[in-house]
Image (cartoon, coloured by chain):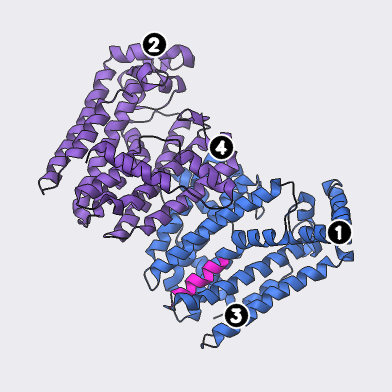
Chain colours: A purple, B blue
């Protein structure tokens, strides 16, 4: 089995399991957002976890789907909160329809995610649901922290930022791999290593995201170089630059959004933030390798995860 | 045990179980809406169901709380969708805070409702969760139908309206009493009578709501007489009047909102809609009594439910 196989199996399952409830005005936007694509990292992690612990991956598909539906619910509601017009180059649900429709479609997706989760029949069902609900709550807390940081006058510290990113992004990856692995009947304690591994994947992934936004090739990423800088978004790079030289950095962010991009990127290269953030990403990857060795020592094959880890850190888009 | 005891037991539980998570900006609006009061009908029904099937009501409290938290999540999100400024005379969450906060607080309440549900330990846990999730989905479908009806050009039929009301209001009452009764270890089949009973309570309740809005004493209801007429809201009365004399009724609804109230009320009395809707409410109540007798024949005491049923239909506010 290769990485792309897992993704393809989930994509096929998704196509065959479109929402088909009534009224149509509720279910159409739900199918729309699920159909916008994406890397399907979360359901892939669920299936990899199941495969690693010796489960036929078909048995973990309801779980994989539950987590992808939950993830898309968060995207749908985040887009309303962030006033985002586009997602993956297409109109967001609240723009294509309206806010009430987007709110309600999201609510219903969260409920359906739980129904899929309950349709899973296999080992560790109770534990899996508990982990899922705890994770869902943390994702909400992370989104609130992110919104709070955006409005805050005082500086956000590196630790606060990393905690927010962990909640908003990494915990759902952790939950995905852990719950997948739990379908194989391993103990909760053993499964925690899977969780930690994917948490570190999430954090290195986020570091690479921040890196690519400022230093990536916009031709390859398909996004404006420095989009985060233009928006004044809190990123690891911005927080670190305020830590290293608060005066110069705050001067740069007083320049108009369009004009500041080149100046900030140049300055960040001068103070070697491009190297620092790659080192940070590498540090998380080292933790991943440590955990893979630990998991591997009990006879579980981690080669697919190694490939995924390398892919995520070497990506240019 | 009297009706008010059940309510008081839940109110005490609620006070001792305030949300206390972090960040505060997420949890404060959640406590705010839960603290706005209300009749607490749903948790009361859960506790009554448990009591009727011989359970110590303390054991059903997490379930009662789950359903009340879920109910308040729907109120919170409905208020955004309906652009409502006030709830029980206080500012709604999205007015006191903002839309993003209200969306996220609601999402988190839905997640916490499920966590409370899972903390229940006792008979029929799996069945209870299944019924809850199915009900939650139906409530969303009902809200979408309600929004669709509001925008529709063509006339809404009585059956469509009753189906919408059943989804939006009655099913959660049904779920409350049924799940309460299931904690006593009765079979799913037996519990269905409890569900049907509370469904009929919900429908008679809604008929009384519609009645009081148009024909009630505004001094007692605390609401503007004819508020629904002013808003042009689809109610059983409006739908029925369009069925009886479509031409005159549509003329009335072309008059400006403020001015039409008295004319419509007078007209509805002329065509005896005030009596018709009370008969309709009575019809649902008869079904309740039939089901109470059926449940009673197996030795279960229905006296508290009889009191509740009488209270709901004789209320003047």
Q: Who comes first in sequence, dot 4 or dot 2?
A: 4
Q: Could you say which quadrant of the image residue B161 lies in? A: bottom right
Residue B206 vertical placement versus A170 (above, below): below
Looking at the rendered structure, which numbered label has been put on residue A263? 2
Report whether mark 2 lies on the same chain as mark 1: no
Residue at the location (47% across, 80% down)?
A: B53
The Cα atoms of the two marked residues, 3 and 2, are separated by 75 Å
**Residue with the mark numbered 4:** A94
Left or right: residue A16 compared with residue B209: left
Looking at the rendered structure, which numbered label has been put on residue B245? 1
The Cα atoms of the two marked residues, 2 and 1, are separated by 72 Å
Q: Secondary structure at mark 1?
A: loop
Looking at the rendered structure, which numbered label has been put on residue A107? none
Report whether mark 3 lies on the same chain as mark 2: no
Tag 4–tag 2 contact (CB < 8 Å): no
Q: Who comes first in sequence, dot 1 or dot 3?
A: 1
Read off the chain for label 2: A
Read off the chain for label 1: B
């Amino acid at each position: 089995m290769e990485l792309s196989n897992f993704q393809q199996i989930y994509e096929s399952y998704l196509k065959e399991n479109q929402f088909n409830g009534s009224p149509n005005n509720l279910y159409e936007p739900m199918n729309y957002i699920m159909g916008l694509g994406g890397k399907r990292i979360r359901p892939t992690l669920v299936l990899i976890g199941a495969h690693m612990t010796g489960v036929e991956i078909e048995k973990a598909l309801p779980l994989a789907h539950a987590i992808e539906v939950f993830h898309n619910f968060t995207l749908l509601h985040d887009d309303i909160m962030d006033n985002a017009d586009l997602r993956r180059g297409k109109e967001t649900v609240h723009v294509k329809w309206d806010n009430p429709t987007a709110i309600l479609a999201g609510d219903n997706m969260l409920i359906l995610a739980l129904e899929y989760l309950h349709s899973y029949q296999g080992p560790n069902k109770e534990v899996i649901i508990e982990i899922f609900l705890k994770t869902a709550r943390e994702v909400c807390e992370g989104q609130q922290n992110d919104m709070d940081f955006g409005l805050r006058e005082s500086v956000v510290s590196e630790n606060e930022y990393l905690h927010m990113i962990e909640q908003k992004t990494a915990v759902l990856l952790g939950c995905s791999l852990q719950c997948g692995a739990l379908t194989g009947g391993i103990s909760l304690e053993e499964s925690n290593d899977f969780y930690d591994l994917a948490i570190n994947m999430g954090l290195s992934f986020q570091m690479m995201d921040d890196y690519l936004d400022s230093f990536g090739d916009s031709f390859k990423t398909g996004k404006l170089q420095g989009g985060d800088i233009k928006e004044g978004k809190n990123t690891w790079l911005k927080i670190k630059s305020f830590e290293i030289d608060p005066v110069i950095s705050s001067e740069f962010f007083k320049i108009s959004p369009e004009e500041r991009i080149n100046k900030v990127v140049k300055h960040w290269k001068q103070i070697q933030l491009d190297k620092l953030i790659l080192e940070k990403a590498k540090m998380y990857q080292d933790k991943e390798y440590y955990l893979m060795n630990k998991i591997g020592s009990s006879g579980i094959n981690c080669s697919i995860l190694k490939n995924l880890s390398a892919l995520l850190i070497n990506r240019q888009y």
